[in-house]
Amino acid sequence: MNRTKLWFAFFVVPILIAFIMVVIIPAIVGIYYSFTDWNGINNNANWIGFSNYIKVFTEDKQFIENFIFTAKFALVSVITINLLGFSLALLVTRGLKISNFLRSIFFMPNLIGGLILGFVWQFIFTKAFDAVGDKLGIAFLQGWLADTTTGFWGLVILMSWQMAGYMMVIYIAALQNIPDSLMEAAEIDGATFWHRLVHIIIPLVAPAFTVGIFLTLSNSFKLYDQNLALTNGGPFASTQMIAMNIYNTAFKFNQFGLAQAKAVIFLIAVAAITLTQIYYSKKREVEM
Amino acid sequence: MKNKRKSKTVLYIISILIAIVFLSPFYIVLTNSFKTQKGIFINVMDLPFGKYFDAFNYIDAFIELNFVKSFFNSLFITVASTSVIIIFASMAAWMLVRTKTKLSTFLFFLFAVAMLIPFQAVMLPLVNIMGKLGLLNPVGLVFMYLGFGSSLSIILYHGFIKNIPNELEEAAIIDGCNKFQVFWYIIFPLLKPITVTVSILNVMWIWNDFLLPQLVINRPEWQTIPLKMFYFFGQFSKKWDLALAGLVIAMIPIIIFYLIAQKHIIKGVTAGSIKS
């Protein structure tokens, strides 16, 4: 009996130590710090109760503005990424000879880090868009990333381009699970592609949508690297997302306690959104 | 029949157009990285010919990025972290599957729930604690990747091991093997497909990760590629010729990796996302 316990410890404890020290203890300490005036530099943190939380909701207009920006971004990008990813999956599963080649191309951006891609698109939006707009006389293409609206759509375009290939791969796996006989039978019965899409493909691919929406939603909410590299939150912090707001509160303004309170709110929001989304999608799948 | 062929042609045209749109950012960055500052200013869409052609951007960027050094820093951190994650996550997952106690169920639940915690919620206390332990260095970084990578890797291994029958191990134990031997000689080889998936997901994450190294690494000689790229870009943000060459250099290792291991990568990513 004792020997079994020793073996259990031998196999589980090494990674458990790392996990507890890196995730669990900081998470608990973090909740404690959110109730203090810790400034991150010296070690005395005084207990100040809910002051940080009250401050976040009453005084910190920036945080609320950034929260709304993040939520809007997450909503729009979840739709565009999954729509694009699903369309690409449909396109490359139609038996074209170049399907594998297309798949490789669509997936490629996903491998490169968000920071590098953010810089790449900064050049595209500010220089290439400008040049094309200048040449063809399209004012719409000029001055991208200089205001909140183009900063928002710049982030949406960047993330759609990067993540669509990832979602495509997930949807391809789901599409390949649909039995060929089903599709052939529908075709013989004279169902158009549109009919097959709405009545066969989409209902059968629904579980993959749960996965896809879950991944893109939590990814969009936690976005940092691309935000930093593309707009750096500008102009005037109007395209700053929550993750960057927390970072700046801590390292630019040395208000670690306040930053930690925001992080706790962020944690609760992310957990609530993802859990609700999983709950409803699972429920819908069963009903279908 | 004729109609069908027509619609195929339309599909070909659409898909090639989309592929061009997808590749155009790479094309624009690549062509402009061979231009002088003035060449970029005059016309972004031109090809780099004539007096505006400049390949020395690459040499300058290579030196400024200290690329050999930062490449090997990235390589060390990625390979070391992925290796320890593979070793310890597979061991733990096997034990958690094969032990039917409350503790083992609870631990697995804890690893799974921790997936919901965003990095920003733990980063400030983490840096504080690791600083006190003297772990703000590459070795400490590897330790932190083990901690952050544990959840997903254990979940993936757990799901895979559940479907491996028990008989093989029992026979080996009767033959006098201890659990260490059973795991490394019998179980671990069977885990190869999921090990490939777990490796690829961790390599892609750690190689590209920026925020954790930025918080942990405080000496220039330890900087990884994304970190070096960030400071490099800050320094040369007005000099696009140099910055673009730097971006191309930073992307080359990943593109080579992709060309070599493409099949495994796409398979691994699919398996990883669906199971999690």
Image (cartoon, coloured by chain):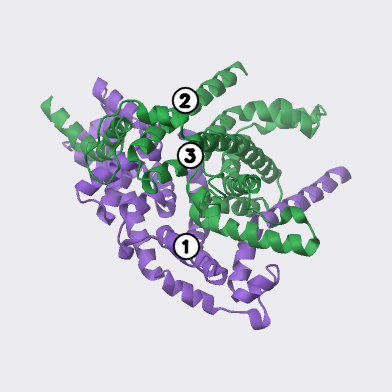
Mark 3 nearby-residue class (10 Å; few <14, some 14–19, many ≥20) = many
Task: Residue B166: give its label.
Answer: none
Q: Outermost residue toward the top?
A: A287
Asked if residue B114 is positioned above or below residue B49 in the image, the reply reads: above
**Amino acid type indicated by mark 3:** Ile
The colour with which the image depicts chain A is: green
Task: Please provide percent x and percent y for residue B226.
Answer: 43, 58
Q: Residue tagged by mark 1?
A: B234
Asked if residue A140 is positioned above or below residue A80 in the image, the reply reads: below
Asked if residue B257 is positioned above or below residue A164 in the image, the reply reads: below
**Amino acid type indicated by mark 1:** Gly
Q: Outermost residue toward the bottom?
A: B51
The colour with which the image depicts chain B is: purple
Q: Nearer the viewer, residue B104 or A279?
A: A279
Task: Establish whether labels 3 and 1 are both on one chain.
Answer: no
Q: Residue tagged by mark 3?
A: A242
Task: Please provide percent x and percent y for residue B54.
Answer: 58, 79
Secondary element type, mark 1? helix
